[in-house]
Structures are given as structure tokens and as C-alpha cells.
Amino acid sequence: MKIFDCMKHIIKASVTAAAIISLSACEKEIKFTGRQQETSIVMFSLASPGDELSVSIRQSAFILDKEWWETIEKGIPGAKVNAFIGNSTEPLPFTLSGNDRNSALFTSGYQPKPGEKIRIEAEADGFKNVYAETEIPLEPVFGVESIRTEKGETDSEAVVYMKIRIDDPDGKKNFYRLNISQTYRHEGTIWTSDGKISTQEISYGSSPVAFYSNDPLFQDGITDSIFGIEVEKELKNYFTDSRFDGDSYSFEIYFPVYDDDYMKTVSIDIKLEALSKEYYEYIASLDAYYESDDFSLFSEPVQVICNVKNGIGCCGASTPSEISVTLE
């Protein structure tokens, strides 16, 4: 039975490979007979409490534009951008970054607050006016219920098991993203010319950590390819409160950390972000777009969700909450 299954995989792979080769071998230039699309304003903004409100304003490029990268990169410095918060208007002037006159950033000194609704509008000569709306989420409430450390597969690492509890507010659908990072201590040895230890140099650094979980809250990190072969992928770190709307929910994650005489993890930083609906849908659809590119010959096209009216892009919001845990 196993041999039969293996032969099926080989046959499918051979047919697919032959199709790809035949398609790539036959090249034919097809003239474009359609109508060139008008360029649009591309607007991106991620508002967050404690950070100055900023917006990136660029222009789209047509698919047949040979200088599409230059078109996108040059931005629209002459654009007029305003943010409307409640009854007040906050102008976002063009930000000149050094000698880069093609900068696309428009920044205000205003720092958004949780619960505020923001509408951002942009206009520029030769383009349709665009706008987008978002709401700054409330700060998420969470805590670490338990943490334990076990020896890893190698002598230089350990595995941390952490149980996290989220207290989800009632009354609306909420969206989250979880990120883990570590602070580690590095001990370097400085040797003299005669082979003796001179000093022990200690430094500290930090790095993100990829975590894993068996909880159904997270989308499975194993996906089935079109040939029936399991392909391991990174665990998606974003999720909704569909399983625990208005209640508390606990889940366990685990991840490797440094653990030897030269490099040892001393603390773990847990960052939980409450995301706006627009931003969650944007990153989820963007993730699906990149996944479909693995087998683009057979995959269905994925539309990246954006909330910019008359234009392209995303204006969303994120409110983080962080906890640091010291490892014994």
C-alpha cells in the first residue's frame, strides 16, 4: 500500500513537472489590448497609542510599467493629508527625511488614544481623493499563569512552556496578535597572545522567538500540499476571540531558548496586540496571498483586502500590551 501511494506521488509530480516545462518552453509575446488603468494613491498607516500618527503616501504602478519600482518609490510629496479625530482635524505635513526628497511619509505629532475613531483623507493633483477609517482598540488584558523549562534536544538550548490567559471584553469581536522575544546574556572570552584568558566580556542582546502550540486557537502549522505531502509552515500568530468571546481563555505555547555557558536566555518578553478589524483582515489576506504563491500554477488568485476608498492600501490600528518574565 505504501509503495502504491508513493507511485501515485511520483506520477503526479512527473505530470506536473512536464506541464511546467512545456509551458515554460513555449513563449509567445501577446500584445496588451486592454485599457491601462489609472494610477491611484496608495495609502498605508498603522496607528498605535504612544506613537506619532504617520501615513505613507505613494502611487500605484501599472503592470506593464517598465519603471514600476521607481514609480512606486518616488511617493507623492505634494499630497495633502489630514486626520479627523472626533470633532478635531489633525494635519499631517510631508516629512522630509534627510536629502531624500522622494520620501512618502506624512507625520503628525498627535498620538492616538485607545477607543478613538480616526478617518484619514489624502488628496493630490492628478489622483482621486482617498480616505479610510479605523478605530484604536482598547489595550488587551492578559497574564502568564504558569511557566516551566525543560532541556532541549541539544546541550545549547532549553524549551520554555508558557500558559497564557486572555481576558476578552464582551460586546464586540476582537482580533489579536501574539509576539515573543527573548533577552539573552552572551559571555565572550578575550585571549592574550600567549593563549591565556585575559577577560570575560559579557554583553546582552535580544531576538524574536518563533513559538509553537497545540491549541486549536492557532491555525495548524502543518499544511497539506497538492501532492499529498505534508509541508511544515510557521504557526500563524494572529487569531480572533471566536472561541472565547467575552470570557477568559487560557492556552499553552512552547519555544526554544539559549541555554549554555556562553549564551543563556535571561528573560522572555510577551507582546499581545489588539488589532483593528481592518488591519487583521489585511495581514490575514496578505498571508494567504503569499501562501498561494507556493504553487501559483494551480492556485486560485487571492485578493488582498484593503480599506482605502478610491485607492489602495490599509489604514489600521494596533494597541499593544507587554509582560516580561525572568527565567530562573
Image (cartoon, rainbow, N blue to C red):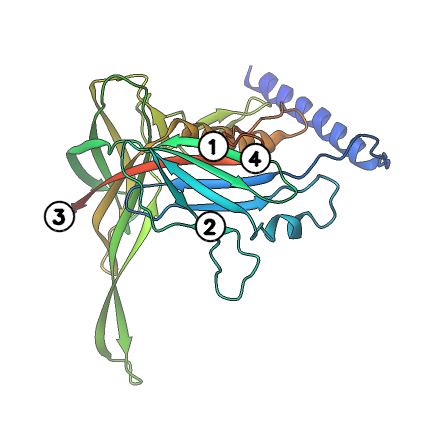
Q: Is residue 264 above or below residue 150?
A: below
Q: Residues within 10 Å of mark 4 (few under 14, many from 20)?
A: many
- Percent across and percent down for residue 291 are 54, 31
Q: Is residue 164 left or right of residue 303?
A: left
- Percent across and percent down for residue 158 are 25, 45
Disc 4 is placed on an element classified as strand
Looking at the image, is mark 1 or mark 4 earlier in the sequence?
Answer: 1
Judging by the rendered image, the residue that carries numbered circle 4 is: 312
Which amino acid type corresponds to the residue marked 3 in the rendered image? Glu
Numbered label tally: 4
Looking at the image, is mark 4 or mark 2 earlier in the sequence?
Answer: 2
Which amino acid type corresponds to the residue marked 1 in the rendered image? Ala
Looking at the image, is mark 1 or mark 3 earlier in the sequence?
Answer: 1
In space, the residues marked 1 and 4 are separated at their CA atoms by 10 Å
Which amino acid type corresponds to the residue marked 2 in the rendered image? Phe
Judging by the rendered image, the residue that carries numbered circle 3 is: 328
Judging by the rendered image, the residue that carries numbered circle 1 is: 132
Q: Residue furthest bottom?
A: 194
In space, the residues marked 2 and 3 are separated at their CA atoms by 45 Å
Q: Is residue 47 left or right of residue 293?
A: left
Which amino acid type corresponds to the residue marked 4 in the rendered image? Ile
Which is in the foreground here, disc 1 or disc 4? Answer: 1
Judging by the rendered image, the residue that carries numbered circle 2 is: 106
